[in-house]
Amino acid sequence: RRPPRSTPLYSSAASDVYKRQVEYISLRFAILANVRTVKKTKEDMGKGFNTAFNASLGIGFATISLGVLSLGLVAAAYISSYIGEGSTAKDYSDICLYLAGYALGASVVGLFARIGGGIFARAADAGVDLTKSEESESNAGAVADYIGDNVGEAIGISSELFASFSEIICATMILSCYAPEIVAEPGMIYFPIIVFSSGIVASMVSVLLATKHNPKSTKQMEENLNFQPLSAALWMTPVLFILCIYLLPSQMQLAGDDYIITRFKLSIVALFGLWGGYLVGKSSELFTSHEYRHIDDLARSCHTGSATDMIYGLSLGYMSTILPVAVVIVVIYVAYVCASMYGIAIAACGMFSTLAVLISIASYTSIANNAVGLSRMSDICYVTMQAEDIHSAGRSIAAHVKCVEIGGAAIISLAIFGAFIMRLGLAMVDLLRPIEFAGLIIGAMIPYVFSSQILKAASQAAGALRKEINRQKAAGRVGSQPDYHKCIRLCVKTSLEGMAIPCSIVMFTPLVAGLFFGPVSICGFLAGMIVAGVQIGTAAVNSGTAWDSATKYIEGRFCRYA
């Protein structure tokens, strides 16, 4: 029997429910860890680092574990209810397309959380900095700044990576349905879920064995954090190879495709994806870590003024796109040559198989940053200095995670693009035709328009918060407590208003293109958006992180240009 047409809505609702649970857990872990990190740092800096890192591990593993559990349950429920003896590949394809509702729900929630939380975080941070006052108890915007770190980093990044994880599982399952050899053994459809489940176990073993407890210096903390992705990739390598060799058919072929795909080729593709993701993240550290000359050069450019600093920072971001893009191109080429579009999906699974560790590292920076702020508000100077050392240890590795996220998103988008083309029954997309070429140009424009609206919203929100902080400072009495809640409400209001246009652009532009110009126009649209989005995303992440690292580098005792 066929499922009702409303089935994708049920999938989307299930995704939303589980994602809300993940957001609550992430926020709860982050809030409790902020205070405990300060308390433990007061006793010993190593204990403070352990507290922040352990809490971030809780966020990372909870996000992926709940995601694997929820998506596995939804997939199992659909397949057991609507698939039986005599079911064809078309039936499997339809069921997996209904699962795409789960990915859609996760993407929408992730989009709202990332954009809204990002505007809130950047507005609060910039608004407080513009007042030229310290993040102390007397600053009305200080609490909003700390909330922004939790909402923008701990929740925002986990939501976005949860969406990417859901998308790649659904895309891989959809492409699996076009291989008769996989359909003949229905258990093989669950292969991407098994990969991520195994990734959780491998990452857990990696963290337990690779973490040095109670580090005594910032360098030891950096080594601790920087070694986590490498250790996870090393442990995941044999696991991925064994899963591909023993769980996938010895030989398969996608419907309407000439490629003969073997399990050995798929294992090679998965390993290329795994190590390609590590290299994409590692390449970002060349431009964002003070261990390399680029940050030293950026600090030197500040010697002649802020204008030269901004110009050099932008050029650094643009230059940093070369290595990640080159790695992504190699991964895509090898994946497609070995296993066609299904290989690209498997490569994306390999790249994100250690996602629990990546989310943990991303959450660490927000926890450590808030610990710095809380120690400042408590006016504990020596704790503040130690907390700043704990936070600085995770600055460059945060860019590692974001670049892996962007590079992985490009491969995931290409896999979804392939599933879309196969569903349409197209043999190829001719980008020289007017409709497809017009879609290509418009798609390349969308990331710039989208980014401009977010920057505009963050700028306006920061300006409004600055005015409110200065108003309270001028009207306040000596010894009176600022109205923190008013600043928080102002940031919430401006971030919700500011996210309306960017979200509308992302959600409705493909619908308008498909309705008025047909589905082939969306092919060009998606291609243009993938190409432009990777470049602007990588450049923006690395420029911003480089400026932040240069600021701390100048403030540090080891900088020659302070």
Image (cartoon, rainbow, N blue to C red):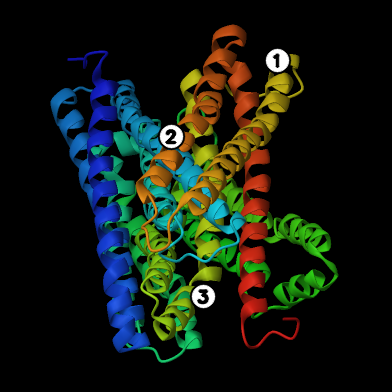
Nearer the viewer's eye, disc 2 or disc 1? 2
Q: Up-down: is 466 above or below 532? A: below
Q: Position of residue 263 (x, y in %)?
A: 41, 53
Q: Earlier in the sequence, mark 2 or mark 1?
A: 1
Residue at x-position 66% and y-position 31%: 449
- Marks 2 and 1 sit apart, C-alpha to C-alpha, by 40 Å
Q: Nearer the viewer, residue 326 or 319?
A: 319
Toward which corner of the image does residue 32 lie, by quadrant?
bottom left
Nearer the viewer's eye, disc 3 or disc 2? 2
Q: How many numbered marks are there?
A: 3
Q: Is residue 252 visible?
A: no
Nearer the viewer's eye, disc 1 or disc 3? 3
Amino acid marked by disc 2: Lys
Say whether marks 2 and 1 touch (CB < 8 Å). Answer: no
- Marks 1 and 3 sit apart, C-alpha to C-alpha, by 49 Å
Q: Which mark is residue 493?
A: 2
Q: Which mark is residue 392?
A: 3
Toward which corner of the image does residue 434 lie, by quadrant?
top right
- Marks 3 and 2 sit apart, C-alpha to C-alpha, by 31 Å
Q: Secondary structure at mark 3?
A: helix
Quadrant in which the C terminus is drawn: bottom right
Q: Position of residue 483 (x, y in %)?
A: 38, 49
Q: Position of residue 182 (x, y in %)?
A: 32, 39
Q: Which mark is residue 435?
A: 1
Toward which corner of the image does residue 560 lie, by quadrant?
bottom right
